[in-house]
Image (cartoon, rainbow, N blue to C red):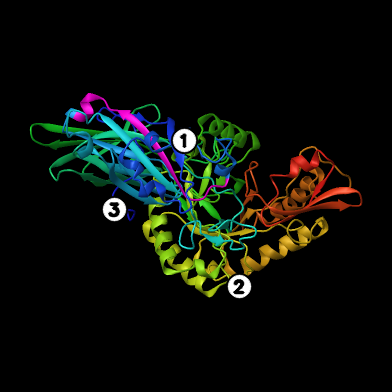
Amino acid sequence: CALALQGGMLYPRESPSRERKELDGLWSFRADFSDNRRRGFEEQWYRRPLRESGPTLDMPVPSSFNDISQDWRLWHFVGWVWYEREVILPERWTQDLSTRVVLRIGSAHAYAIVWVNGVNTLEHEGGYLPFEADISNLVQVGPLSSQLRITVAINNTLTPTTLPPGTIQYLTDTSKYPKGYFVQNTYFDFFNYAGLQRSVLLYTTPTTYIDDITVTTGVEHDSGLVNYQISVKGSNLFELEVRLLDAENKLVANGTGTQGQLKVPGASLWWPYLMHERPAYLYSLEVRLTAQMSPGPVSDFYTLPVGIRTVAVTESQFLINGKPFYFHGVNKHEDADIRGKGFDWPLLVKDFNLLRWLGANAFRTSHYPYAEEVLQMCDRYGIVVIDECPGVGLALPQFFNNVSLQNHMRMMEEVVRRDKNHPAVVMWSVANEPASHLESAGYYLKMVIAHTKALDPSRPVTFVTRSNYTADKGAPYVDVICVNSYYSWYNDFGHLELIQRQLTTQFENWHKMYQKPIIQSEYGAETIVGFHHDPPLMFTEEYQKSLLEQYHVVLDQKRRKYVVGELIWNFADFMTEQCKWQFGLWDKVPVLIFSGSRPHLYKNKLARRGGVCL
């Protein structure tokens, strides 16, 4: 296994040796509205309960903070916000010195600093991945150690070196703006929600514990192969027992030691949804650790779901278990009313029921890694995933700098470390629509792709492009070409008759130059529900239907050759930044003309007035 990284990020699961305590619910919240956004640090809000620093709000976790309050300033707030929660721990956690207590934050967008009882405990950059710290030394120190005050400061500012990147624009005309007034410029088309958007929890392990497990799988004749590598921390004196159980909880293979290979004769393979009569078959890999410690032996248990499957790419096919696979699905966003990007189980289950109802077998995590629970559902339902990092909005030359490159490679390390064991994840995507025609982008993408391949040689790597096939400097390094195009929508508006010609030419040019399989990674048209016109006009339901039909004529022809997928944009509505717009009348019809982002915010309001969005 070539996936070994420094430190593990196993999903916290309860076992005979591990407990977890959810900290979801209401937290105290305060935004720092001071001019420099640093009053909280100057007054050291982390040293005492946050309520003593001034007025606080109740803030649900997980959720984005932007849509919760009636204070309009929070909707577009940029700067530091502060969260706090007081917790009482079970006495056994604080008295048993053979117990290790860990604080884990599912995500905090975008930069976070964490204090426990006023002690700076950890910091993390990157808003869509988990981070954690061992806080045992803070909770096992005295009679009051069971009382914890967890304070988290989060800054959602995007800069040229963050992922995604952004810029801060200061508006200096004092006749219009107060001194120091600034706005956050973004270069992507979704809203920059922020906050504690995934679960926060505490969990325990023994002091000698299973730190990480890496699994890769293969098929040899009629046998499945499960290669495992296990890292242990806390002691060098230990024994490991590994057992593989099938879906009926029957033992099918076993081994010992930190690495090995389990052979499963007649294995049930993990297949995508609708590709097999029994899709998404999962085994359970049980790992048991026994360590000789003073005053006595210590045991740790961890169970990892495992799907046995293979992934391969040829010049014209994407193969799962040696069979051609066609990505027939959607792009998504983690986005919902009120919750923003906050994780929500009912919404997640509804989404998966809709995916199956649509007959979808795949989606891309546009444009950032989704919650771990999403990937667990994909494993269970057989939904194939293109796992994308937050490399979106790389639109300006200054974004391809050495600091950004190091951050991007670190981000891919964290993505691979977290998601490497999910059978549903079949390909990594390192970016969406970067300015890949730039020479600097070519070197940048080459380095990130090579780094990702070194982290995980078992999966193909791609990025999603909108550049011209002759100018794209990153395409030579990917395994699969993923191309976005919006013919008759962003180009040649309204001319449906051009789609088949332009799409056919697109596919033929890309494949002739690179001899790689191609995925139509985005296509589609917006529509206003209930908006009709015949013959079709843009934004009507008829236009969306006709545009998709024209695309599908070509996709159905090319999928028998070298096109291996189609992912419609988008699965569901999502929030964007408020747009620059002008309002007027055209032939007595209200018209709203937008510049920049997509006009999701105003379409329905205008439609109710018989208007059109352009």
Label 1 with label 2: CB-CB less than 8 Å: no
Q: Secondary structure at mark 3?
A: loop
Circle 3 residue: 6
Q: x%, y% of residue 611? A: 83, 45
Q: Which mark is residue 62?
A: 1
Mark 2 surroundings: few (<14), some (14-19) or many (≥20) residues within 10 A: few
Distance of mark 2 from mark 3, alpha carbons?
37 Å
Ranked by sequence position, the earlier of labels 1 and 2 is 1
Q: Amino acid at mark 2?
A: Ala
Judged by depth in the image, the label closer to the viewer, 3 or 1, is 1
Q: Is residue 96 left or right of residue 505?
A: left
Q: Between residues 297 and 560, which one lies in front from this camera angle?
A: 297
Circle 2 residue: 471
In the image, is residue 290 part of the stretch drawn in magenta? no
Q: x%, y% of residue 334? A: 55, 42
The residue most toward the top is: 91
Ranked by sequence position, the earlier of labels 3 and 1 is 3
Distance of mark 1 from mark 2, alpha carbons?
42 Å
Q: x%, y% of residue 300? A: 23, 34
Mark 1 surroundings: few (<14), some (14-19) or many (≥20) residues within 10 A: many
Q: Between residues 527 and 91, which one lies in front from this camera angle?
A: 91
Q: Between residues 168 and 179, which one lies in front from this camera angle?
A: 179
Q: Magenta part of the protein: which range?
A: 76-94
Q: Which mark is residue 406?
A: none
Residue at (37% x, 33% y) in the render:
85
Position of 432 relative to 273 (above/below): below
The residue most toward the bottom is: 439
Q: x%, y% of residue 32? A: 46, 45
